[in-house]
Amino acid sequence: MGYLLGKPKRLPNLDIFPIWIRGVKMFFDALERISANEARAMAAHGVSPARISDWRKKRRLPTRAQALALATVMDLNFDQLERELTIIETKADAETNEGFATLLQKLKGQWHFS
């Protein structure tokens, strides 16, 4: 979770996921659909428009509180959204940390069944 401290960590190419990670598009689909009214509702939950812009530009990922606000405003399944964010974080960590890369390879065949 290095993106929370100091300079944001460069996220992996989030447009292309391996086939074994299923359903990871909900977060990005929701970002594309956020209307001005929904952005104002998220601002009421403490999520600034600048932060939404960072998500869209793939500079940062939402904190769990921000993800809950997104799920609430956009009527998304928070558990699935949380899983997607965890997958993205793990993939980002795997690019710079050999231990995470090994873990990701071990979980590769089982992840979509959980």
Image (cartoon, rainbow, N blue to C red):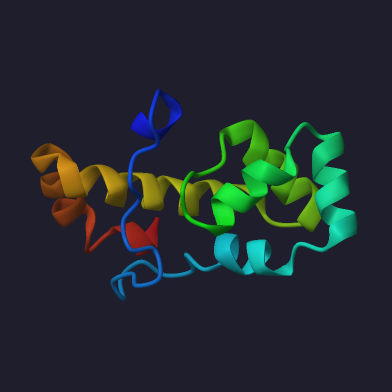
Quadrant location of the N terminus in the rendered image = top left
Residue 61, position in %: x, y? 50, 44
Q: Is residue 87 visible?
A: yes
Question: From the viewer's perspective, is residue 6 above or below residue 112?
Answer: above
| Quadrant position of the C terminus in the picture | bottom left
> Which residue is more in the foreground, 96 or 82?
96
**Res 19 quadrant in image:** bottom left
Furthest-bottom residue in this view:
19
- Residue for point 54% across, 46% down: 82
Q: How many marks?
A: 0
In the image, what residue occupies the spot 34% across and 39% down? 9
Classify 45 as above or below 31: above
Q: Is residue 19 above or below residue 37?
A: below
**The quarter of the displayed image where residue 29 is located:** bottom right
Q: Nearer the viewer, residue 109 or 40?
A: 40
Question: Residue 55: image x %, image y %?
Answer: 56, 51
Q: Residue at the spot x=58%, y=34% of the render?
A: 64
Q: Nearer the viewer, residue 71 or 14?
A: 14
Residue 110 spot, x, y in % from top left: 27, 59
Which x, y percent locates residue 73?
81, 50
Residue at far right of view: 37
Residue 67 shown left or right of residue 96 in the figure: right
Q: Residue at x 15, y 56 (%)?
A: 105
Please give left or right for residue 26 compared with residue 21 in the image: right
- Can residue 1 be seen? no
The part of the image, by quadrant, that contains residue 49 is top right
Q: Is residue 90 left or right of residue 8?
A: left
Left or right relative to 53: residue 99: left
